[in-house]
Image (spheres, rainbow, N blue to C red):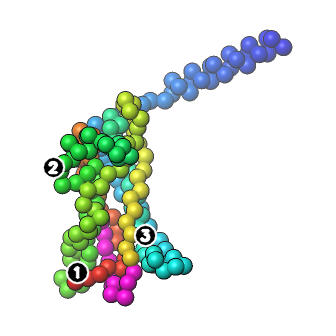
Amino acid sequence: MQRQLIQCGFLLASLTLMLTACWNEPNFSDVPAISYKAIDKITLPASEDRRTPRRDSVIITIGFQDGTGDLGEDVGKADSTRLRTVFAKETWGNYRITAYRLNNTTSTYEELPLAVNAKLFFPRLTKEGQRGPIEGTLDFRQNFTYSNSSVITPVKFTIKIRDRKLQESTIIETDTVHVPLLLR
């Protein structure tokens, strides 16, 4: 019985060594890299009390890779000195979403300034002090409200992110979706 336990332990140790020896840490660039994954639109009904109107929720999914793992900010901390000092004079946070609407007259996309996209932050993706390559996906959500004056309009987005050293990724572009907009 004791011999079987020793053999079982030796087998587990051997398997563990083999599996860890086969794993190579990814070698990503220290500058964040992003890729376009998907854009989805979900129409949300108005609330029963009609306080929240019908709206389209657009979800943009991007993939990311970063060699140092320094993505995201401590946005949950009410007194974040870093956010106040580093981003005080910056025009955008750690991700930038720019919306573009199709101009039917010229058949070109024009920038659509949206106040909610002014200064955006996503939370820290690693624990404090943790370093090393990371990879995953991020979802960004944007709501577009229906009203009697809104017009269903084709829109697309460009996105870029930056790490805590303020190194910027490349810019990616989404596919087009149709959402309600108040056009002037």
Query: Callout 1: 10 Å neighbours few (<14), some, many (20+)?
Result: some
Write down the residue under mark 3: 57
- Residue 134 at x, y percent in the picture: 40, 39
Q: Residue at x 35, y 50 (%)?
A: 122
Q: Residue at x 79, y 11 (%)?
A: 3
Circle 2 sits in a helix, a strand or a loop, which is it?
loop
Q: Nearer the viewer, residue 60 or 121?
A: 121
Q: Residue at x 47, y 71 (%)?
A: 42
Q: Nearer the viewer, mark 1 or mark 3?
A: 3
Query: Callout 3: 10 Å neighbours few (<14), some, many (20+)?
Result: some
Report the span colored magenta. 146-157
Quarter of the picture holding the C terminus:
bottom left
Write down the residue under mark 2: 89
Q: CA distance from mark 2 to mark 1?
A: 32 Å
**Considering only vertical position in the picture, is 29 above or below 142?**
above
Q: Earlier in the sequence, mark 2 or mark 1?
A: 2
Kind of residue indicated by mark 2:
Lys
